[in-house]
Amino acid sequence: MKNKPFIPLPPAFKSSFFVVVCLAFPCVSFADSPPLLLAKTYKQGVSLSDYWVSEKLDGVRAFWDGKQLISRQGNVFRAPAWFVKGFPEQALDGELWIARGRFEEIVSTVKKHVPNDNEWRQVKYMVFDLPRHKGTFTERLNHLKALFNENPNANFQLVRQEKVKTHDELKLRLDEIVSAGGEGLMLHKADSRYRSGRHGDMLKVKTYEDAEAKVIAHLPGKGKYKKLLGALLVEAAKGLRFSLGSGFSDAERATPPPVGSIITYKFYGKTRNGLPRFASFLRVRNEIVETVVP
């Protein structure tokens, strides 16, 4: 079955509608956005002895508030009742995850209005923090270990944390993870308290950098991509605009991320003008995006 051609909507059509786009997580309800700790990018020179190291899981971030699983943007996941049965009443921070290289499957599973039991049986809630615990990360980690020993549950697991001493040792560990199909590493500062926002208390380590941007427009393709998406015009932090023309599958070019949606792109450093070098599309952020067009 051939993909339908990509046909941009005419401006007059766009200007007369209230557009509500649900990209991937049609949810039961909306909760307050959880005050999550967000990661900065690792740069060599950090004192690695101050950090715990874990694998960066290619899953969907989820906050357990003691009753339900909530996304980073405050959307409630429709997890089956049996999946969360026995979860502790304490708040947890982690990822809904299946396995390395199966990001699309976990997104497909958690986005459904009616949860599919067979699909959810593949999912694990991989926990790495206790957001409401007042102690340091090391203290929170010890509390988590005790919590998991007291409340064994096949549906949630504790993310393994370990120590490295040097950048070379960290790079070796990163190469091992990536070679095995993993995405990268996470560093948690051992003596840090949990606080919301993007801080150096948590660092992500990858073979490339990534960031988010808003889709501003669809640029038409040429040649073999005629009548399909050629590139996305996106706007990143501080109003920086640029086009993304690579990283798309044919299906994504036929049905590109809607205008107003948030995408993640990867890149390898920046130019003198601050533009991302060798930027390419990675994925849609997979959250509900509401765009009101007058």
Image (spheres, rainbow, N blue to C red):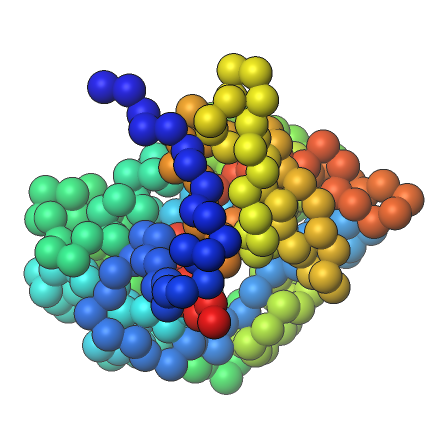
In the image, residue 261 lies at what x, y percent?
47, 55
Is 59 left, or right, of 83 in this rendering?
right
Q: From the viewer's perspective, is residue 160 above or below residue 179? A: below
Q: Quadrant of the N terminus?
A: top left
Q: Quadrant of residue 22?
A: bottom left
Seen from the viewer's position, the closer of residues 128 and 83 is 83
Q: Is residue 183 left or right of residue 111?
A: right
Single out the residue that lies furthest toward the top: 224
Residue 128 point in image, percent of width and height: 43, 60
Q: Is residue 135 left or right of residue 14?
A: right
Please give the name of the residue rendered at 52% of the width and 15% of the height, measured from the top-left corner. Answer: 224
Residue 143 shows in the view: no
Outermost residue toward the right in this view: 272
Q: Residue at x 66, y 41 (%)?
A: 243
Q: Is residue 184 left or right of residue 85?
A: right
**Residue situated furthest front in the rendering:** 12
Count of numbered labels shown in the rendering: 0
Q: Position of residue 16 (x, y in %)?
A: 40, 65
> Which residue ends up furthest to the bottom in the rendered image?
134
Q: Nearer the viewer, residue 96 or 176?
A: 96
| Residue 112 position (above or below residue 276) | below
On the image, the x and y values in percent for residue 122 come to: 20, 42
- Please name whichever residue, 35 or 266, is drawn nearer the observer in this view of the structure: 266
Can residue 82 be seen in the rendering of this structure?
A: yes
Picture quadrant of residue 75 = bottom left
The quadrant where residue 275 appears = top right
Determine the residue positioned at 24% across, 65% down: 27
